[in-house]
Amino acid sequence: EIEFMYKPGNVSVAPPVVTPHQPRLDWQMWFAALDHHSSSPWFTSFVYRLLQGKEDVIRLVQVDESQYPFSARPPVYIRARLYKYWFTGSAEGSQGPAPWWRRQHFQEFFPTVSLGDPALENLLSQHGLKDKLSPLRPADALLPWLLRSLRQLVRPFSGPTVLWSLYLVAATVCLLRALGRRPRGGAPPARHKGPRRGEPTDRGGGEKNGQVRRKEAKEAEEKGECRARGAADGHGGTKKKK
């Protein structure tokens, strides 16, 4: 059997944790199994590329070449069989390692075909999937060169590893930017606190202002007393005219 990286296959293998990666091929395999293979034309092309041994397609199935049984030479025949899978329960004991899954063969999904098989050629022609000449592109074009370089760079790593690495890099950049916005070397601004009960209103730097206000209040009080005396003299005394 050809074991995929993410979808159920070997009943003894635990399901991998792939979040937030979206394994497109394994996901589409699940949808294809819900109907006849003719409803998923891409599956015919997929079988055809596996028979040809296309490296880019094989890497969608398995990144680790040691896990792909036809890494040395492409398969001569391929067929697809449909199984139904269930998780095993804790009460289902067995000798040796406990299986994660139990499965039941349901039916044949895709007939046995090989390269040059008339049935395969007919399906490829029916869906318009025959090999076509690709448009010629300059060998030194910037975008194809960047894509090839990026693919070679991430080639040894799985999809979840690449995505989690990108998320961690983005989180680290955001954290460093947030730390860079903080003021450096300065004391935090002092918060104004109102006077406690029983304490003088003016403190520290306000002592001078308090003395000025007390002096002004004293002067105003003296002026008020002088005016009061003047008013009393005006009502009680008489002025003589010459």
Image (cartoon, rainbow, N blue to C red):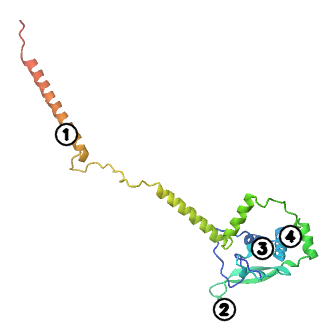
Q: Is residue 85 above or below residue 148?
A: below
**In this rendering, which labeled residue sits more in front, label 3 or label 4?**
3
Q: Which residue is mark 4?
A: 38
**In this rendering, which labeled residue sits more in front, label 1 or label 4?**
1
Q: Amino acid at mark 1?
A: Gln
**In this rendering, which labeled residue sits more in front, label 2 or label 1?**
1
Q: Which residue is mark 3?
A: 55
Q: Could you say which disc has been placed on residue 230 in the image?
A: none
Q: Quadrant of the N terminus?
A: bottom right
Q: Secondary structure at mark 3?
A: helix
Compare residues 236 and 171 and report the one nearer the observer.
171
Instruction: Give the spatial CA distance, label 3 vs label 4.
Output: 25 Å
Q: Quadrant of the C terminus?
A: top left
Compare residues 69 and 150 and report the one nearer the observer.
150
Q: Amino acid at mark 4?
A: Ser
**Quarter of the figure with residue 27:** bottom right
**Label 3 crowd (10 A; few <14 / some 14-19 / many >=20):** few
Q: Which residue is mark 1?
A: 211
Going from N to C along the chain, the mark reached first, 4 or 2, is: 4
Residue 173 visible within the image: yes
**In this rendering, which labeled residue sits more in front, label 1 or label 3?**
3
Q: Secondary structure at mark 2?
A: loop
